[in-house]
Image: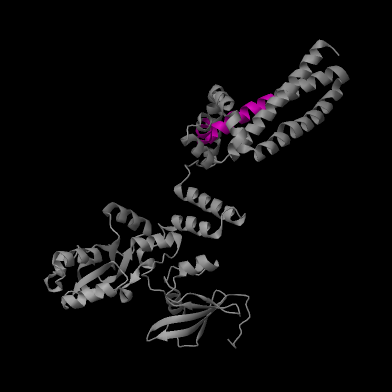
Amino acid sequence: MSTAHIISIASIGFLLALSAFFSGSETALTATSRPRMHHLEKRGNKRAKIVGRLINDREKLIGAILLGNNAVNILGSALATSVLISIVGDAGVAYATIGMTFLILVFSEVLPKTYAISNADRMSLAVAPIIASIVWVLTPGVLAIQSIVRTVLYLFGVRLGVRGNNEAEEELRGVISLQAEEGIVVKQEHDMLSSILDLDEVSVEEVMTHRRDMAMLNVTNRPTDLVEQVVASPFTRLALYANDPENVIGVIHSKDLLRALHTNQKDISKINFSGLAQEPWFVPDNTSLQEQLNAFRARRAHFALVVDEYGSLKGLITLEDILEEIVGDIKDEHDIVYRDVISRPDGSYLIPGASTIRDLNRQFNWDFPDEQAATIAGLTLHQAKKIPEIGEQIDLFGFTLEVRGRQKNRITLLRILPPSKPLDESN
């Protein structure tokens, strides 16, 4: 074997190693965790900054790596073919094809990519400076290739667009769900993260306190009666109206009332509730929770009254209502404790009619629609197309909903049997 053959074989080995480097780098940089790189970049890691810059221009990165990888693979195969032809004749073409296919597949593709997948973050940080230099050197060739590719795709009617916010949000939802399925994120954390993403899809109407359940003060009542109502109420803010609940003139804060009592030396008769009230803030019922949260922060407010398209009072929304949509119910020592969901031995559940569909879906992983109604009682009425009697059953998406409690036209209690559960009428 001549010196030229030895140099050629050594060159083939070097080109195979270079091909392995390109293959592993491509896998590492495309599989690396962008959130982790962003976190490291914020902490001042220079290599993470390079990684971030590379993956932000993914098309140029992939183009440069593929250009380099294909160039070394083709050159290596050509050298191998030349060496084997000079040794064994024309059969060297077949030997070179078989041998280089095996070497490239095992040592330049599968092996480095397998390692890169298992160590994506660490490897991407290690190779980033070298790959950045290669990308810079190969940029003219990459741009030329991109122009050709875009032209061909354009001729076939393919338009390359920018990734939208909806796609990014769907990817984030998928990551959250995947982490939950793998046990990395617990259910409570999964629900919280998903609820944050849902804020712009949920309207104020779906989580507000209905007008029927609002604690309100009539300014025409005696001051002593009004003070007694404020003291007896578990709420710190109450709407103040004049004669008609539709005629809301302000919002009373219990602390303002306490200061007024102190200023007037506890003489309740001297308190001017109208002058004490803060100006009411009205918001449309179709406002999203994300918009309302931003509005609360901008106004430094915690309380707003909800009106419909005709300006009629529908209820109220508080900052706590929005926070509870994210973290779940927040109870303190003054909150009124309502009946909770009761699990029954037959697999069914006794559920208050005022329970929101979103909370039930989140708690039990059900999939009730919440477009037509916000509460399970409202969904039952929508499905029944009438006000059902006690004991009446309704089938909905495989669930059996049985009315167990009713006050006038309100459904107060339901028994819900999920699918694939035997209905035990003895309960």
Q: Residue at x 44, y 73 (%)?
A: 355
**Place of residue 25 in the rendered image (x, y in percent of width and height, measured from the top left):** 63, 32
Majority secondary structure in the magenta region: helix
**Place of residue 107 in the rendered image (x, y in percent of width and height, measured from the top left):** 75, 31
- Along the line of sight, the residue nearer the viewer: 10 or 417: 417
Q: How many marks?
A: 0
Whether 278 is drawn above or below 87: the answer is below
Start and end of the magenta stretch? 50-72
Left or right: 89 in relation to 344: right
Left or right: 19 in relation to 177: right
Residue lying at the far front of the rendered structure: 265
**Place of residue 414 in the rendered image (x, y in percent of width and height, measured from the top left):** 48, 80
Residue lying at the far top of the rendered structure: 3
Residue lying at the far left of the rendered structure: 270
Left or right: 249 in relation to 106: left
Is 56 in the magenta?
yes
**Quadrant, the N terminus:** top right
The quarter of the picture where residue 135 lies is top right
**Quadrant, the C terminus:** bottom right
- Along the line of sight, the residue nearer the viewer: 404 or 89: 404
Q: Residue at x 60, y 79 (%)?
A: 345
**Place of residue 370 in the rendered image (x, y in percent of width and height, measured from the top left):** 45, 68
Taking the image as drawn, is residue 366 in sight? no
Q: How is the image coloured?
A: one colour
- Along the line of sight, the residue nearer the viewer: 241 or 237: 237
Is 310 in the magenta?
no
Q: Residue at x 62, y 33 (%)?
A: 123
